[in-house]
Image (cartoon, rainbow, N blue to C red):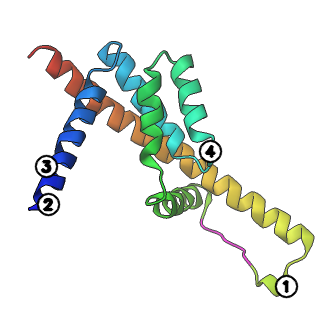
Amino acid sequence: MPKIKYLQKLKAKLYKSLVWIWQQEGSAGQRAKGLAVGIFSGCFPFFGLQTLLGISLAGVFRGNLILAAIGTWISNPFTYIPLYWFNYKVGSFLIGNHEDFTKISDLNSYQVWSQSISFITRILLGSIVTGGVSAIVIGSIFYKILQQRKFK
């Protein structure tokens, strides 16, 4: 019985949270832009700066600031590794999958620097593409849902 009450309370809190998200200020476009720029920002490996980036972009694009902060939660401790691995793979695919990683024992300072640049370039390019596509798709879906709810 205690598990059932706990699940009922959890369900009620989740429902209240979703209602709160739906009732955010702004037009459907502003709310969708806020969520989209938050998702875009959350795809970057800038730990601790994703929320600031999302809120800043929401300000520039006149999106909802709170939904921008919520959108950055696309990356969290459960999704960091798969998301950034995927971003790296996308960047590697776009740049070319030539990886010249050598053994650690064979590295000199130049190789460490060049491989770091290669890694950073690949993950940032992948983050831009993944974040952009995700933001457009999820932002568009959210916008359509908000528009449909508006007329009901």
Position of 40 relative to 122 (above/below): above
Instruction: Indicate the secondary structure of the residue bearing disc 1.
Output: helix
Per the rendered image, the range of residues in magenta is 97-101
The percent coordinates of residue 77 (x first, y second) are 49, 58
Determine which of the numbered discs, if any, sits on residue 106 in the image. 1
Gap between marks 3 and 4 measured at Cα = 33 Å
Tell me the distance, in whole angstroms, between the alpha carbons under discs 3 and 1. Answer: 58 Å
Which one is in front in this view, the residue at disc 1 or the one at disc 4? 4
Task: Indicate which disc, 3 or 1, sits on the residue closer to the N terminus.
Answer: 3
Is 42 situated left or right of 115 in this image?
Answer: left
Give the residue at mark 3: 8
The N terminus lies in which quarter of the figure?
A: bottom left
Residue 55 picture location, percent across and down = 54, 27
Give the Cα distance between marks 1 and 2: 59 Å
Query: Which of labels 3 and 4 is toward the front?
Result: 3
36 shown above or below 1: above
Q: Label 1: how many residues lie within 10 Å, few (<14), some (14-19) or many (20+)?
A: few
**x, y percent for residue 147:** 21, 19
Under circle 2, the secondary element is helix
Tell me which residue sits at (18%, 46%) in the image: 9
Q: What is the crowding at mark 4: few (fewer than 14 residues within 10 Å), some, or many (at least 20)? A: few
Secondary structure under badge 3? helix
Type of residue at label 2? Answer: Pro
Q: Distance between the residues labelled 1 and 4?
A: 34 Å
Q: Where residue 90 appears, x then y in whole percent?
A: 52, 57
Disc 2 target residue: 2
Residue 142 in sight in this render: yes
- Assess whether mark 4 and mark 3 are in contact (beta carbons under 8 angstroms): no
Q: Nearer the viewer, mark 2 or mark 4?
A: 2
Is 20 left or right of 65, judged from the image as shown?
Answer: left
Question: At x 15% / y 21%, what residue is drawn?
Answer: 149
Q: Which of marks 1 and 4 is nearer the N terminus?
A: 4
